[in-house]
Image: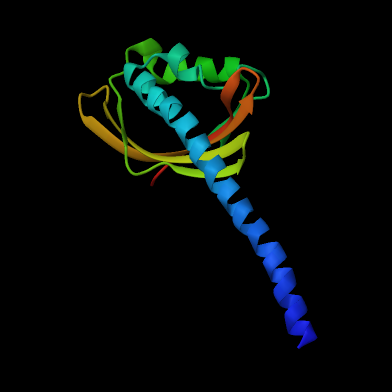
Amino acid sequence: MRRIFGIAIVACLLFPGVARAQSDSAATSALVKRQLQPMLDELMLAANAHDTDRFLAAYLHQPALVFVFNGVVTKGWDALEALQLKWWNNGKSDVVYTQRGSSEFTVLGPDAVVVTNPLGSRRTLPNGQASTGEFTVTMVWQKRPEGWRIVQAHESTVQ
């Protein structure tokens, strides 16, 4: 009986802490989502405008930035900017991006989150035919003194 009573006391002491931690975690997740959603919306608008500077504003502007596209690793903001300009033909691309589903947020803490975005695209090929594609972008966001920045991103096409 003493043992059961002891376990009950320990449970009463621990469970409010667990509940509080879960509540704090939920509040942190909600706050992070509220902070990042406008930035994700802006990324989509900038992408559909083919505005490289505007699009890359959310990325870490340092050599430590890592971007992986279908297994090819690009390091540094300058290298990513050069690729993005090429991909969008210096802003003359006609590609249109769409959301294929909800973004998934994995909050690692109040200053780090992973966002997974399922996207689609439609563009005109040089021969005039329309081409559609599906891909997913996973971004690691870090809250830094200058604000939230993407410090790593991985993009892969759906085969």
The N terminus lies in quadrant: bottom right
Q: In this view, does 44 lie above or below 28?
A: above
Q: In this view, does 64 lie above or below 19?
A: above
Given residues 27 and 151, the one toward you in this image is 27
Given residues 21 and 103, the one toward you in this image is 21
Query: Is residue 60 at all visible to an observer of this figure?
Result: no
Query: Is residue 68 at all visible to an observer of this figure?
Result: yes
Residue at position x 59%, y 18% from top? 77
**Percent coordinates x, y for residue 147 in the rendering:** 58, 21
> Is residue 19 found left or right of 4 in the rendered image?
left
Residue at position x 57%, y 43% from top? 107
Residue at position x 20%, y 24% from top? 128
**Number of numbered discs present?**
0
Given residues 87 and 77, the one toward you in this image is 77
Instruction: Report the colour scheme.
Output: rainbow
Residue 117 found in image quarter = top left
Q: In this view, does 52 lie above or below 14?
A: above
**Percent coordinates x, y for residue 31 in the rendering:** 51, 36
> Is residue 87 found left or right of 112 in the rendered image?
left
Residue 59 found in image quarter = top right
Question: In this view, which residue lies farthest toward the bottom?
Answer: 1
> Is residue 85 found left or right of 150 in the rendered image?
left
**Percent coordinates x, y for residue 9 in the rendering:** 73, 72
Q: Is residue 73 above or below residue 80?
A: below
